[in-house]
Image (cartoon, rainbow, N blue to C red):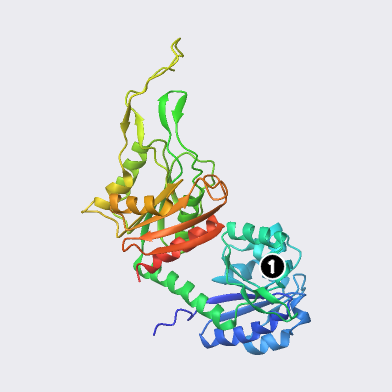
């Protein structure tokens, strides 16, 4: 069996909680998987375990003080953040989560996080009341929007004697999660997958100053493109008009109209994956006016509309250059699953991702979403309300798994 851990470099940060003792067993398990591990022991973590116990297991130096005169000349906070493949924070206490969310950089751990360009994976552990407190939930939501990942927490009895959510995931659960993460990365690397993602609205112009459109912000599509790129997929984002910052490591093509988006999609074929999250206008004006349409005395204005190309249907039915996986989106206001399933059948795509845009907390322009992924075999995966970046990660993970 292939070892997806072999040669991977993990920077482990140990926070200050009773669960810190689990990090020792975690190190032992990871070392058995032939990973390279460096550790950062926070000031709080030193109250529960010692640097000697860590170094005995890692056979390496333990980093503690950002102002260490013997080593900071090597810029440890920079070099460590560049050395690793991932940063694993276990346990991630409420205090550490708050620090990371606020962008503070007052110790070794928080400075490395702020300087890092690598995937950060949090393993939260705290009292149930601390975990469910709105401040902690807001901080976690912010970090998930920054594309951090989270393992747990689980539900169970805690060291304080209370029972509930907030218990740190076991070392075995963490290792299993990381194995899946590295496996996904490896699959993409070997297969050299390519994807196109459409996102945002389109603007269908009536005249030089007016257009009709919809409320799509493009946030979910941009997050999917960024997530696929983080998995190593060569990704092109074809975006309608938005105010969003282009994701890193993603080629972006800006368009205005549905016709322009359709032509750009055709140019990018063939690809392995197509994710059609854009809210494309179904119709455009039949006769565009080169001059501003003047208001007349009559109370009504009649516009003749023509149907726009159906990008999702074109991709799904394109026999010669059809992507191996075509994923559509269905933004619905009622009978969400029923209408989305009908769209799946009608468009001949492989998956349809349905969400209820009548709920403003998960609809257009919101930072969160809740979706149902409906597969061709009619099975459904429901992903509960979470940040759009987390939703994008869950979608991307399933996309990559489809190519195993």
Residue occupied by mark 1: 131
> Foreground residue, 129 or 247?
129
Q: Position of residue 313 (x, y in %)?
A: 29, 48
> Foreground residue, 94 or 373?
373
Q: Is residue 148 above or below residue 153?
A: above
Q: Is residue 207 above or below residue 118?
A: above
Q: Position of residue 168 (x, y in %)?
A: 64, 77
Query: Which residue sits furthest left?
Result: 320
Q: How many marks?
A: 1
**Helix, strand or loop for disc 1:** helix
Which quadrant holds residue 305?
top left
Quadrant containing the N terminus in the rendered view: bottom left
Q: Residue at x 70, y 73 (%)?
A: 126
Q: Position of residue 222 (x, y in %)?
A: 48, 51
Q: Position of residue 347 (x, y in %)?
A: 29, 50
> Foreground residue, 295 or 193?
295
Mark 1: few, some, or many residues within 10 Å (few <14, many ≥20)? many
Position of 264 compared to 230: left or right?
left
Which quadrant holds residue 233?
bottom left
Q: Residue at x 46, y 43 (%)?
A: 200
Which quadrant holds residue 309?
top left
Q: Is residue 161 above or below residue 193?
A: below
Q: Residue at x 37, y 50 (%)?
A: 339
Query: Which residue sits furthest top?
Result: 297
């Amino acid at each position: 069996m292939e070892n997806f851990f072999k040669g991977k470099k993990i920077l482990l940060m140990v926070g200050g909680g009773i669960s810190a003792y689990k990090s020792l067993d975690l190190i032992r398990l990871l070392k058995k998987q032939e990973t390279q591990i460096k550790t950062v022991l926070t000031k709080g973590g030193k109250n529960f375990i010692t640097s000697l116990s860590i170094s005995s297991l890692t056979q390496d130096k333990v980093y503690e003080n950002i102002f260490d005169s013997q080593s900071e000349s090597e810029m440890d906070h920079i070099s460590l953040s560049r050395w690793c493949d991932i940063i694993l924070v276990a346990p991630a206490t409420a205090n550490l989560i708050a620090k990371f969310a606020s962008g503070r950089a007052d110790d070794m751990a928080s400075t490395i996080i702020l300087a890092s360009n690598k995937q950060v994976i949090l393993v939260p552990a705290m009292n149930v009341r601390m975990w469910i407190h709105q401040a902690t939930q807001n901080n976690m939501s912010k970090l998930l929007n920054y594309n951090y990942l989270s393992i747990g927490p689980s539900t169970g009895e805690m060291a304080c004697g209370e029972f509930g959510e907030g218990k740190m995931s076991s070392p075995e659960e963490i290792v299993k999660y990381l194995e899946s993460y590295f496996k996904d990365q490896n699959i993409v690397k070997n297969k050299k997958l390519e994807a196109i993602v459409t996102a945002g609205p389109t603007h269908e112009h009536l005249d030089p100053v007016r257009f009709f459109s919809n409320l799509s912000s493009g946030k979910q599509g941009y997050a999917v493109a960024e997530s696929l790129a983080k998995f190593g997929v060569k990704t092109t984002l074809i975006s309608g008009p938005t105010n969003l910052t282009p994701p890193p490591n993603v080629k972006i093509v800006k368009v205005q109209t549905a016709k322009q988006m359709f032509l750009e999609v055709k140019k990018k074929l063939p690809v392995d994956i197509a994710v059609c999250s854009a809210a494309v206008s179904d119709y455009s004006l039949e006769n565009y006016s080169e001059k501003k349409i003047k208001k007349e005395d009559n109370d009504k204005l009649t516009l003749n509309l023509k149907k726009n190309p159906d990008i999702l249907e074109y991709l799904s039915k394109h026999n010669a250059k059809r992507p191996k996986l075509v994923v559509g989106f269905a933004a619905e206001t009622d009978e969400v699953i029923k209408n989305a399933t009908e769209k799946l059948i009608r468009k001949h795509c492989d998956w349809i991702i349905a969400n209820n845009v009548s709920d403003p907390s998960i609809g257009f322009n919101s930072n969160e979403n809740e979706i149902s992924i409906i597969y061709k075999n009619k099975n459904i995966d429901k992903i509960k309300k979470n940040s759009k970046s987390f939703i994008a990660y869950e979608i991307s993970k399933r996309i990559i798994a489809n190519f195993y």
